Image (cartoon, grey):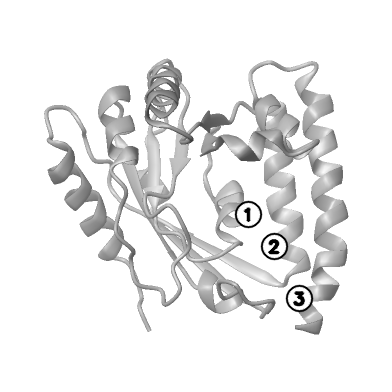
Amino acid sequence: MLRARIYLLFFVPYTLLCSLAAVFGGLFDASGRAGHAVARVWGIGSLWAAQIRLQVEGLEQVPTEGPVIYMGNHQGNFDILALSRAIPRLFSWVAKEELFRVPVFGAAMRRAGYIPLDRSDGRKALRSMNQAAQRIAAGASVVIFPEGTRTKDGALLPFKRGAFMLAARAGVPIVPFTINGSRAINPRNRIELRPGTIRITFGAPIDVAGVPEAELLERVRAAIAANLEVS
């Protein structure tokens, strides 16, 4: 617990500093590349301070051109930091709209080209999903956790249909990824931090064209589960 609290003394001001840098960089760069570069620095510095190593496999599976949707399991708070460093291409996050209202941090997300998803009611959710699909189809690669939250025991949680509705509307391939080791480093809802290794494995892209949502969900789930280590 003490180690986690000491880490937070570094992480909170470091995150604020990176957010300010992303906002400033976004004033001169509308492409989101400046914000993405800052996010990589944020991930590298945060993992280093926590004494977390990163192992990445399957990068040859990631398409080098065209938009994709990355989908994978969600084990812990360090998943976002690890993915910010692991994914070699420019990408954005699809995040709940409330996060964009956080001072400085929300502005940094907008400058980096992240995509808000409003789930407050059905009509707003549908409108924001259509807007997100249009941005992805136009060339924005994004990361989504289809479980919607972190797992408690490492096993895959039920997938939410919204992620696959978005993929079908956008019409771009899904690149599955599997995260291992994150939960042991920082268990959900516990102020603990242990040194360790996060392993991210990318799978082969999955084409969404003509595939029913239910079948697409099962294909993606099977691809993620194939590399999952459940203790």
Q: Going from the N terminus, do you reach mark 2 or mark 3 first?
A: 3
Residue drawn at (37%, 19%) of the image: 137
Q: Going from the N terminus, do you reach mark 3 or mark 1 first?
A: 3
Residue designated by label 3: 4
Q: Going from the N terminus, do you reach mark 1 or mark 2 first?
A: 2
Quarter of the rendering containing residue 128: top left
Which amino acid type corresponds to the residue marked 3 in the rendered image? Answer: Ala
**Mark carried by residue 136:** none
Work out how far the residue at label 3 is from the one at label 1, CA to CA, in angstroms: 16 Å
Residue designated by label 2: 47
The secondary element bearing badge 2 is classed as helix
CB atoms of marks 1 and 2 within 8 Å? yes
Residue 126 horizontal side relative to residue 141, left or right: left
Q: Is residue 26 above or below residue 150?
A: above
Quarter of the rendering containing residue 221: bottom left
Which amino acid type corresponds to the residue marked 1 in the rendered image? Answer: Leu
Q: Is residue 9 above or below residue 101?
A: below
- Of the pair 131 and 120, the residue shown nearer to us: 120
- Of the pair 133 and 121, the residue shown nearer to us: 121
Work out how far the residue at label 2 is from the one at label 3, CA to CA, in angstroms: 13 Å
Residue drawn at (74%, 49%) of the image: 42
Quarter of the rendering containing residue 114: top right
Residue drawn at (18%, 50%) of the image: 219
- Of the pair 53 and 176, the residue shown nearer to us: 176
Nearest-to-viewer mark from 3 and 1 = 3
Which amino acid type corresponds to the residue marked 2 in the rendered image? Answer: Leu
- Mark 1 crowdedness (10 Å alpha carbons): few <14, some 14-19, many ≥20: some
State the image coordinates of residue 159 (x, y, percent, origin top left). Answer: 30, 53
What is the total number of numbered labels drawn onto the structure image?
3
Residue 79 horizontal side relative to residue 1, left or right: left
**Mark carried by residue 81:** 1
CB atoms of marks 3 and 1 within 8 Å? no
